[in-house]
Image (tube, rainbow, N blue to C red):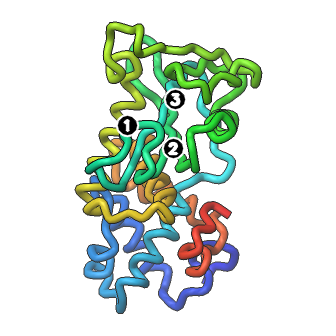
Amino acid sequence: MTAGTIFERTRMPLRTWFAAMWFVTSQKDGASALGLKRVLGLGSYQTAWTWLHKLRQAMVRPGRDQLCGRVEVDETYVGGSDVGGKRGRGSERKNVVVIAIEVLSPYGFGRVRMRQIPDVSGSSLVSFVRDIAEKGSAIQTDGWGGYNELSKCGYQHEKVILSSNEDPAHISMPGVHRIASLLKRWLLSTHQGSVSSKHLDYYLDEYTFRFNRRKSHSRGMLFYRLMEQAAMTAPLPYHQIVHREHNM
């Protein structure tokens, strides 16, 4: 078996891995572990679940380019209960996911980046922006104070103060709100919402991979890209997956 890639340490032939990659990329809305287990005839749910996480890890291209130009950034809240408790920032039952998306001129959207963060502090939010956006980019956010240090980090920081803006949030910052809505719908439909916070980042990687290739006219190209990136992805043992050693 190929050394130094996700295919290492498995007794399955490469053609079975290729069949798994084709199944995952040919499904418009992704695949569940149960679906992969059934199609490949795998012996256990755990094997299928592990394979899917290995493939999601490979969906992040090493050294991928940063976003540039005008970039919308905002947070959304995924999972947990909607009954009782706080809503929005300060919610204790939900996972915080920060989203960034390029805004193209004169219209349309480019690439997206997402990450689960522990809180909405300036340390978490600014660190995310510095990782995913080129210096000099115009970063558009709402008025939350956690973004205040962006201008000191080499970015053009544009604030949209929603409370004083006649347009609702989904009009003032349509990109991130559309992504948030589509992400939650995808998690509910394909995965029945059963995604733990421990492994949420793997699912964010898959959604990012699919969204950024949404204009591809061929499913075969998605398969090719995943196969190409899998060949450059380090092995991901089961214990790293279950212990949340994401993108190590």
Quadrant in the picture for residue 191 = bottom left
Going by the numbered disc 1, the residue's amino acid type is Ile
Quadrant in the picture for residue 123 = top right
Quick one: label 2 or label 1, which is nearer the N terminus? 2
Disc ID at residue 73? 3
Quick one: label 3 or label 1, which is nearer the N terminus? 3
Disc 3 element: strand
Residue 176: image x %, image y %?
Answer: 42, 31
The Cα–Cα distance between marks 3 and 2, rounded to whole angstroms, is 10 Å
11 or 169: which is nearer to us? 169
Going by the numbered disc 2, the residue's amino acid type is Met
Disc 1 element: helix
Residue neighbourhood size for the residue with mark 2, other residues' Cα within 10 Å, grouped as few (<14), some (14–19), many (≥20): many
- Determine the residue positioned at 38% across, 42% down: 86
Residue neighbourhood size for the residue with mark 1, other residues' Cα within 10 Å, grouped as few (<14), some (14–19), many (≥20): many
- Is 146 displayed left or right of 47 in the figure? right
Q: Are marks 3 and 1 in contact (CB under 8 Å)?
A: no
Evaluate whether residue 221 shows in this view.
Answer: no
Evaluate whether residue 57 shows in this view.
Answer: yes
Disc ID at residue 179? 1
Residue 71: image x %, image y %?
Answer: 54, 24
Disc 2 element: strand
Q: Do the residues labelled 2 and 1 touch (CB within 8 Å)?
A: yes
The Cα–Cα distance between marks 3 and 1, rounded to whole angstroms, is 11 Å
113 or 7: which is nearer to us? 113
Residue indicated by mark 2? 114
- Determine the residue positioned at 49% across, 37% down: 99
- Determine the residue positioned at 75% across, 25% down: 153
